[in-house]
Amino acid sequence: MESSAVQSAANAGLTALRVLQTRDAAAAKRAIAARVNGVLCDLSCLVSETDTVEPVLPEDADALEIYRHSTAHLLAAAVLDLFPDTKLGAGPALKDDPKGGFYYDFLQEKPFTPNDLARIEKRMRELVKRNVPFRRIEMSRDEALQKFSADELKCYFISEKGGENPSFYTLGDRFIDFCRGPHVPSAGCIKAFKLLSVAGAYWLGDEKQPQMQRIYGTSFFTQEELDAWLQQREEAAKRDHRKLGRELDLFSFTEEVGSGLVLFHPKGALILHLLQEFLYGELLARGYDLVRTPHIASSRLWETSGHTAKYRGDMYPAMQFEEESVEYQLKPMNCPFHIQIYKSQPRSYRELPLRYAEMGTVYRYERSGVQHGLLRVRGFTQDDAHLFCTPETLEAEIVGCLDFAQKVYATFGFDYKVELSVRDAQDQTKYLGSDDVWALAEAALTKALDRLGLAYTRVEGEAAFYGPKIDIKVIDAIRRTWQLATIQVDFNLPQRFGLEYIGADNQPHMPIMVHRAILGSLERFFGLLIEHFGGKFPVWLSPVQVAVLPIADRLNEQAAAVARRLRAAGLRVEVDARSETIGAKIRQAQLRKVPYMIIFGDREAETGDVAVRTRSEGDIGTLPLDAFLARITHEVQQRLPTP
């Protein structure tokens, strides 16, 4: 608030909580914070009679982040009580993070142990029981730097993020840290929390800086919500793609190859091939042109595109060869290459839209602290496409992209939610392009969503600086959300590279460019699929679709003949001819998550029928071989999502 409003509030002795109690006692009782003139504030915030004050309730969008940020401070207060010499780093709430709801970084020589986490959690509960209040303190920048001169970590935050009058929060006897807030009124408001793990984290994410200890935790408004989340987390651990990737022999990482660089084993590479084959078929059916581009390019290309200025820290260093003055870099994006193909000849409005698609491998320097199996790697392949269109064809192209995404996600059995990200209505100076062009693009995105009857959430201020976008977030089998598809309208790159087409008026015009990805990164999508299906891939994606299991060595040759018949029909089949019991063979096939097992005994050898088991249903009876073939072939051809 303005200083005059604060002064009048002080004179009147009004707080946000008092105003809420007067206006709506029931809401005030449930509120954890307030919005004062639209700004998030503590309930103890001083207000004037003319200020607009609204409660932040547990069901509100901002509430859980405030609650978890407060729990992070509760964690830090407990750590300082038990380990007084510890220095504090950052302690934010996290959004959509698999490791939990918040973390705090601590600079402390002695590593935290599991026993330490239990002690810290116990002390947190003691602070909750005592209902220790959160208190906000403001001081001048110079005063703050002098007060905390012995703490270089606090001084960094004060200098870089504190402004002229940085604010601090206290909780208990020892804890005080730089923070903009807001927070819940007191520790007693925090009802359900759990500390989860400890990890290493470099100060400021810089490998040259000291390594800190990061404690992760989560919190919820009720114990029931926390228990449900912990159960989901336990299920997620069983489905962890890194664990299943090892067990199913799909992929690996090695120090010899390098951090974040994945090696796909035969079964994993086969699944990737099947994914790409599916996508290529859809691309060609939808009128896309396939292109292929290099893995490196002249650094000048990235300077023109703006990637060097914006993403330099995520790009690999430039390479220079003695005989050439040009520097080269591994590509972080595919778009400038597709632009060069567009520019390779004059274009007419009659040619547009042009749709260029590529399974393009790009390289980005992901810090070791954020790498996570296949979900965050340094070299990955995008199902990338760039559409060059006229204003008149923009809406139809977006409809086509959305329809494409719907088809793909239905194939894998995903639910999803859609977000439309638009400009910040309060500050449009940070966006490129005229109001007319933005209005055109936003209208096209909105109309496309409406034409397909897709429910969506409008997100103000989340548009890219170069245009509005649609993001699609899929929901997996245990109700986690993953950002995958994006459809982004771009006015920036066509302008930077001087793209043109000759319109019906025989004059040059700048095309509109649409960036479009459905799976995003193939590697990340593969990791998601492993966890979504728990390693039990649908039949069409399974590396081995049928395991033929003879009950005795004397039947191996006839079992192999059955396998040849199945392979001739296009199926992927293995015969377990080991001298093991049939029970051991079934257990092995189950562990490998093979969809179908054929138990081949003397009766099957005589009749030509097959005794069939599935990994999920068990024994489903004896079928004529042709009937079994018809069943499994239908599942493969229809790409049925049910494992």
Image (tube, rainbow, N blue to C red):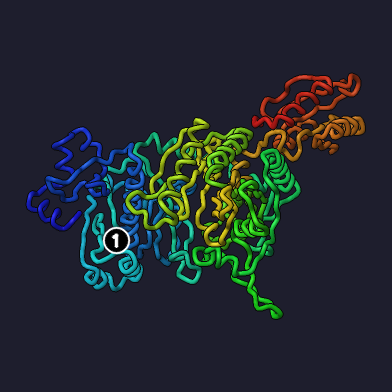
Furthest residue toward left: 11
Is 624 or 587 nearer to us in this picture?
624
Residue 385, how many percent across, how many down?
62, 49
The residue positioned 80% from the left and 27% from the top of the image is 599
Is 371 or 227 nearer to us in this picture?
371
- Within-10-Å neighbours for mark 1: few <14, some 14–19, many 20+: many
Is 167 or 87 nearer to us in this picture?
167
- For the N terminus, the image quarter is bottom left
| Location of residue 484 with respect to 539 vertically, above or below | below
| Location of residue 106 with respect to 590 vertically, above or below | below
Asked whether, in this view, residue 620 is left or right of residue 113, the answer is right
What is the tally of numbered marks visible in this picture? 1
The residue positioned 48% from the left and 57% from the top of the image is 199
Where is residue 158, by image quadrant? bottom left
The residue positioned 52% from the left and 66% from the top of the image is 313
Residue 206, how many percent across, how many down?
48, 67
Can residue 579 be seen at all in this image of the molecule?
A: no
Is 183 or 610 nearer to us in this picture?
183
The residue positioned 73% from the left and 21% from the top of the image is 620
Asked whether, in this view, residue 324 is left or right of residue 482, the answer is right
- Mark 1 = which residue? 177
